[in-house]
Amino acid sequence: MTTLCRGIITDWGGVLTTPLRETITAWLAADGIDDTRYRDVMRSWVQGAYNGGAVEGNPIHALERGEITTAEFERVLAAELRLVGGGPVPAEGLIHRMFSGFHPVEEMYAALRQARQQQVRTCLLSNSWGNGYPRDLFAEALDDVVISGEVGMRKPEPEIFRHAIELVGLAPEECVFIDDMEDNVHAAVELGMIGILHRDPAETRDRLAETCGIELDPMPS
C-alpha cells in the first residue's frame, strides 16, 4: 500500500516565483550586461556548485552557505562581467537588480495554503543568494522556512534536506520535494523523498494532489 505524503518541501526561486531563466534574461537586458559573458561565467561556477565539480573557492557555494557576504559576492561577480559596450558593471545592488524581476506565482502559493488546510506540513528550502524573500507571503503558506545562508548548509548537501525533514516532523518517505534543478531533486530522492522536477505550475499541482491525496482548486483559465 502506497503511503501518501504528508509533507511538502519546496524550493523558492523558479518554483514559487516566475522562471529563473526569464528573470535573468530580462535583468541582463535592463542593465545592459553582456549576455554571453555572464552565461560563460555562471556556467563555470554552477558546474562547481551543483554538478559535482570542485567547490573550493567557488563563489556560489560560498554565498549560499553564508561564508561570504552579499556585497563580497557582488564585487566578485561584477569583476567578471562587462557591459555590452565593454564598460564595468556596477557591483553595488547587483543582487537586488538581478532578482527584481522575480514575481510570486499565486497558483503555487494557493496550492501550499490549501495543502496546509488539509493537514499537510509545508516547508521552504531555498539556496539564498542574499536576495530578499517575500516573507509576508510565507505566513499562510508555510509551516517552516529554511534558508541556506542562515543555516550554513546548502542544497544538494544531504544535511540541509535532513534539517528540513526534521522541522516538518515526518519521515523522508512521507515528504515530497519540489525544485527546478535536477541535482537537488536527485539528492532528495536519494534520501527517500518523492521528487518533483518543477517545470510548470499546473503539472506540479497535479502531482501534489495525487501524491498527497489532497484536493486543489482548479488553475485559473
Image (spheres, rainbow, N blue to C red):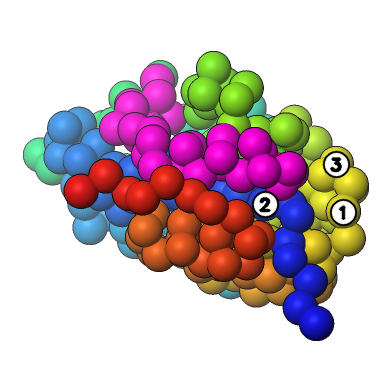
What's the amino acid at mark 3?
Leu
Q: Secondary structure at mark 2?
A: strand
What's the amino acid at mark 2?
Ile
Between the C-alphas of marks 2 and 1, the distance is 10 Å
Q: Secondary structure at mark 1?
A: loop
Q: Is residue 38 visible?
A: no
Which region shows up in magenta? 93-122
Q: Is residue 115 visible?
A: yes
Q: Earlier in the sequence, mark 2 or mark 3?
A: 2
Residue tagged by mark 3?
167
Residue at 62 percent across and 67 percent down: it is 211
Q: Quadrant of the N terminus?
A: bottom right
Which of 151/37 is in front?
151
Between the C-alphas of marks 1 and 3, the distance is 8 Å
x and y percentages locating residue 123 in the rendered image: 69, 41
What's the amino acid at mark 1?
Leu
Q: Nearer the viewer, mark 1 or mark 3?
A: 1
Residue tagged by mark 2?
8
> Would you identify the image quadrant in which residue 28 lies?
top left
Q: Using a 10 Å C-alpha cutoff, classify the residue at mark 1 as few (fewer than 14 neighbours), some (14 to 19) or many (20 or more).
A: some
Tell me if label 2 and label 1 are in contact, CB under 8 Å.
no
